[in-house]
Image: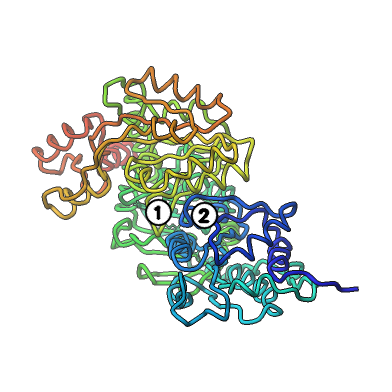
């Protein structure tokens, strides 16, 4: 026999029916009726009270990136709604499902220039795949179910705006959920003719490369097997780091600016590129413009979007890689393959030469060395936006069991600390690191309060170099202009952390770093480790001068600037390997 329940409570029951465990947000008056529902449902769904709605939306986006499950966030009408929008774009740009519940003034006050009232649908029109305002209490739970299905189907953000009075209204207590019937979309299988075409093109190559993105995240074994069989060095996009372990000898890292030297040089010199589940916006920079591209993607809208192709294969990455493995003959290693692996070894030896470097202000290598040493296979890393992406990409040694995320394409600063809330709640036994520059950390560090409130012992690392380093390098190297607006005043971030109830560590020396990281790992509360980092920029992979065929003065200047004397350009290794043939 059916009973009665508040529509807001049924909203939550529908959300729960989709397996959602928690919801991030900050109450405001227009959301009181939904807060009442959260109170009634407190045994079934956890409310995480963040201190800024943007952080709640970023935490929900991070939860979706880490788990594949829809992230849920809310904000009240007016400012709460507006604050959500940056986190929504983060979810949209990294293609993860999100549900945002947005408060609205009671229906009788809507459209009358009321306090904190605004027409909310237009502001979410661009970011959302589904964007509706509830008009009746009876229809509200069903609307939520529709919003969740749309978010999963389109890998994007659904917004449901809820006028305050509707969520309080009692309605029939049936839970209108379609969750039991949801099926993940079937993945297209490769056409055998396209597989033959791809292998024909690959068989003509002197310098073939396997360049994969997040679309290959479920295909680690196939990537490695195909790389080994056809002797293809592997390069990934930045967010695809960790799919193949960093220690794999043929995995060169990512290309572009957030990049390693061997990966950039491999992309620039490859003559055929097998481009798998990869939609890097910098495709024209990272691939040799003369290279023949074989693109594998499940989405037909991606073919030729970034680069001209010779073979488009509309199919799942894993199935396609398997079909290529099955249909191919073992290849002999090319000079390009052997040179790329030697180039990686040379790069790693150069990085390792700084791992015990005790110069102050500190270089990033010894700090990551400490993290690599103490990190376990299940540890989780949340990476902010800026030079920290470059250092993480180059210096963190990930295993496929490690989890990590950043704000990949939206690239919003302030990502790491909010994202750590989701990571530590979801993986309580893992050590969780938020890694930020002092620019990114300044933006949303109030969420240390949330870490403290919910007993989330996250290790928050702040790499303080007192500049917006990524932009400083861009202004200097790309735009060739005087530095403008990038300098940052320093703050005592350890004290800021302490003021919010975390442990605070100021790290000026390598010994202090070792002590701080050990103490933070052992602690049962959050910590903030403020590392006094060098203001020197990471070696640029965009404008390298290391080749013997380069202007010797430019090489000498580049080597001196980055202490890069031991680094050899790929053409050095190619000449060595060609001579050995
Ligand atoms: P997505 O954009 O998610 O694309 C994945 C692709 O896989 C899509 O085309 C999708 O249709 C397809 N796909 C999905 N499932 C499957 C399947 N089953 N089979 C086949 N295909 C599938 N990244 C770099 O690499 N280099 C840089 O220099 C760089 N600089 C950055 C700088 C900063 C400060 C930041 C924060 C990020 C930077 N990034 C960089 C990241 C970059 O902005 C993008 O986020 C990234 O390139 C996107 O990676 P992706 O193409 O792998 O993922």
Q: In the image, what residue occupies the spot 31% across and 29% down? A: 532
Nearer to us in this view, 452 or 69? 452
Disc 2 vs disc 1: which is toward the camera? 2
Label 2 CB-ligand 1 distance < 8 A: no
Report the residue marked by disc 1.
Answer: 208
Q: Is residue 202 left or right of residue 473?
A: right
Q: What x and y, as percent, mark residue 78?
A: 45, 68
**In this view, 198 is above or below 413:** below
Q: What is the crowding at mark 2: few (fewer than 14 residues within 10 Å), some, or many (at least 20)?
A: many
Q: Is residue 550 left or right of residue 124?
A: left
Q: Please say which color scheme the image uses.
A: rainbow
**In this view, 329 is above or below 357:** below
Residue 168 is drawn in which quadrant? bottom right
Residue 153 is drawn in which quadrant? bottom right
Q: In the image, what residue occupies the spot 49% across and 33% down? A: 501
Which residue is at the far top? 511
First in sequence: mark 2 or mark 1? 2
Q: Secondary structure at mark 1?
A: strand
Q: Secondary structure at mark 2?
A: helix
Report the residue marked by disc 2.
Answer: 56
Could you tell me how many numbered marks the image carries?
2
- Mark 2 in CB contact with mark 1 (< 8 angstroms): no
Q: Which mark is residue 312?
A: none
Q: What x and y, as percent, mark residue 315?
A: 56, 67
Q: Is residue 172 left or right of residue 42?
A: right
Residue at mark 2 to residue at mark 1: CA–CA distance: 44 Å
Q: Is residue 391 visible?
A: yes
Residue 411 is drawn in which quadrant? bottom left
Q: In the image, what residue occupies the spot 57% across and 31% down? A: 376
Taking the image as four quarters, which one is ligand 1 found in?
Answer: bottom left
């Amino acid at each position: 026999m059916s009973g009665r329940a508040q529509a807001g409570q049924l909203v939550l029951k529908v959300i729960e029916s989709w397996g959602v465990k928690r919801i991030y947000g900050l109450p405001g008056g227009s959301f009181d009726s939904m807060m009442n529902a959260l109170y009634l449902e407190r045994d079934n769904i956890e409310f995480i009270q963040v201190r800024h709605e943007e952080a709640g939306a970023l935490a929900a986006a991070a939860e979706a990136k880490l788990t594949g499950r829809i992230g849920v966030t809310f904000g009240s009408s007016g400012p709460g709604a507006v604050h959500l929008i940056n986190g929504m774009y983060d979810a949209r740009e990294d293609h993860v499902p999100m549900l945002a519940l947005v408060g609205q003034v009671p229906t009788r006050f809507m459209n009358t220039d009321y306090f904190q009232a605004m027409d909310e649908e237009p502001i979410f029109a661009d970011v959302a795949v589904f964007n509706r305002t509830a008009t009746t209490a009876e229809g509200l739970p069903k609307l939520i179910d529709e919003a969740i299905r749309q978010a999963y189907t389109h890998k994007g953000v659904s917004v449901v705006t809820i006028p305050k009075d509707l969520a309080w209204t009692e309605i029939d207590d049936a839970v209108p959920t379609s969750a039991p019937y949801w099926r993940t979309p079937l993945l297209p299988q490769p056409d055998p003719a396209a597989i033959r075409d791809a292998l024909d093109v690959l068989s003509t190559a002197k310098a073939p490369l396997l360049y994969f993105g997040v679309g290959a995240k479920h295909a680690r074994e196939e990537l490695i097997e195909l790389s080994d069989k056809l002797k293809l060095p592997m390069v990934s996009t930045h967010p695809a780091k960790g799919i193949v372990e960093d220690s794999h000898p043929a995995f060169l890292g990512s290309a572009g600016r957030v990049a390693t030297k061997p990966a950039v040089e491999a992309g620039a010199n490859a003559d055929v590129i097998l481009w798998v589940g990869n939609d890097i916006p910098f495709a024209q920079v990272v691939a040799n413009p003369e290279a023949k591209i074989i693109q594998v993607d499940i989405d037909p809208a991606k073919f030729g979007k970034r680069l001209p192709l010779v073979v488009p294969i509309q199919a799942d990455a894993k199935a396609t890689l398997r079909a290529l493995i099955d249909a191919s003959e073992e290849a002999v290693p090319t000079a390009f393959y052997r040179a790329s692996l030697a180039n990686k070894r040379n790069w790693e030896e150069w990085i390792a030469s700084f791992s015990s470097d005790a110069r102050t202000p500190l270089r990033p290598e010894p700090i990551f060395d400490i993290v690599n040493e103490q990190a376990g296979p299940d540890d989780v890393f949340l990476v902010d936006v800026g030079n920290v992406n470059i250092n993480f990409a180059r210096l963190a040694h990930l295993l496929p069991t490690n989890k990590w995320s950043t704000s990949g394409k939206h690239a919003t600063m302030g990502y790491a600390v909010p994202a750590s809330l989701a990571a530590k709640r979801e993986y309580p036994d893992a050590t969780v690191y938020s890694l930020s520059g002092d620019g990114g950390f300044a933006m949303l560090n109030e969420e240390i309060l949330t870490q403290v409130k919910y007993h989330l012992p996250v290790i928050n690392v702040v790499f303080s170099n007192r500049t917006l380093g990524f932009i400083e390098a861009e202004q200097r190297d790309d735009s060739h202009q005087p530095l403008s607006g990038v300098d940052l005043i320093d703050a005592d971030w350890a004290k800021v952390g302490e003021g919010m109830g975390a442990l605070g560590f100021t790290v000026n020396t390598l010994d202090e770093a070792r002590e701080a990281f050990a103490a933070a790992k052992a602690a049962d509360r959050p910590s903030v480790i403020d590392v006094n980092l060098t203001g020197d920029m990471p070696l640029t992979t965009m404008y390298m001068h290391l080749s013997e065929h380069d202007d010797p003065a430019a090489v000498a200047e580049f080597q001196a600037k980055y202490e890069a004397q031991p680094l050899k350009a790929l053409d050095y290794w190619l000449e060595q390997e060609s001579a050995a043939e």
